[in-house]
Amino acid sequence: DPNATQAELQKALDAIKLAKAGLVKAVTPPPAAVVPAVGRTVDVNGVTYKVTRSAAINGTAAAVKLVNKKKTKITIPATVKIDGFTFKVTAVSAKVFQKSKKIKAVVIGSNVTSIGKAAFYKCGRLSSVTFKGSKAPKLGKNAFRGTASKMKLTVSKKMKKKNLNKFKSAL
C-alpha cells in the first residue's frame, strides 16, 4: 500500500519476520541402512567371509572360502566390513584352506575363537602361524594336520601359559 504509515509498515515487517521464523525446512530422513543378513558373503583379501550373526553392533562372521589360491600369506582379521557394518571374525570354518599348497604363513585375528576341522589340513608349506588373541581358539579335528613339520607357532604375550599348553596339545 503506497499510503501506508510507518507503524503499518513496521507491523507488516514484523509479521513477515515471524512467519519466516516459523518456517521449517522439510527434511527427508536418509534411508535406513539394512544390516546384512545371515549368510551374506563378501571377499576380502582373497578370503570369503560369511555373516554368522546379523546385528548392527555385535555381528559376527566366519572365514568360509579361499578365493585367491595363489596367496602365500593369509591374514584373517579381527573384524571385517560388510556393507558398512563391522563384523567380528570369530571362526575359520571347516576345510577352508584344506590342501592349499601355496600357503606359507597365516595370521589369525584376535576375535577368532574356533578353527574348524581340517581347516589347514595338508597345507604342506604352512610353516608359520601367528595368533593375535589372548585365548587359545578351539581347534577342530585335524585342523593343522599335514602342515610343515617345523611349523613355527607365534602367540600373543597376553596368552596365559595354561591356554598356550592346551593349544599346543591340540595341534
Image (cartoon, grey):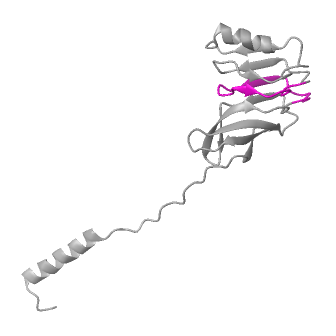
Furthest-front residue in view? 141
x and y percentages locating residue 20 in the rendered image: 27, 72
| Stretch of the chain drawn in magenta | 98-121
Residue 4, placed above or below residue 30? below
Q: Residue at x 78, y 24 (%)?
A: 106
Quadrant assignment for the C terminus? top right
Quadrant assignment for the N terminus? bottom left
Q: Is residue 44 magenta?
A: no
Residue 124, placed above or below residue 55? above
x and y percentages locating residue 145 in the rendered image: 88, 19
Q: Is residue 114 magenta?
A: yes
x and y percentages locating residue 161 in the rendered image: 66, 7
Q: Residue at x 67, y 21 (%)?
A: 132
Q: For residue 100, what is the image quadrant?
A: top right
Q: Residue at x 84, y 17 (%)?
A: 127
Residue 1, placed above or below residue 139? below
Magenta stretch, main secondary structure class = loop
Residue 27 is left or right of residue 148, and the answer is: left
Q: How many marks?
A: 0
x and y percentages locating residue 92 in the rendered image: 76, 31
Residue 59 is left or right of residue 68, and the answer is: left
Residue 113, placed above or below residue 151? below
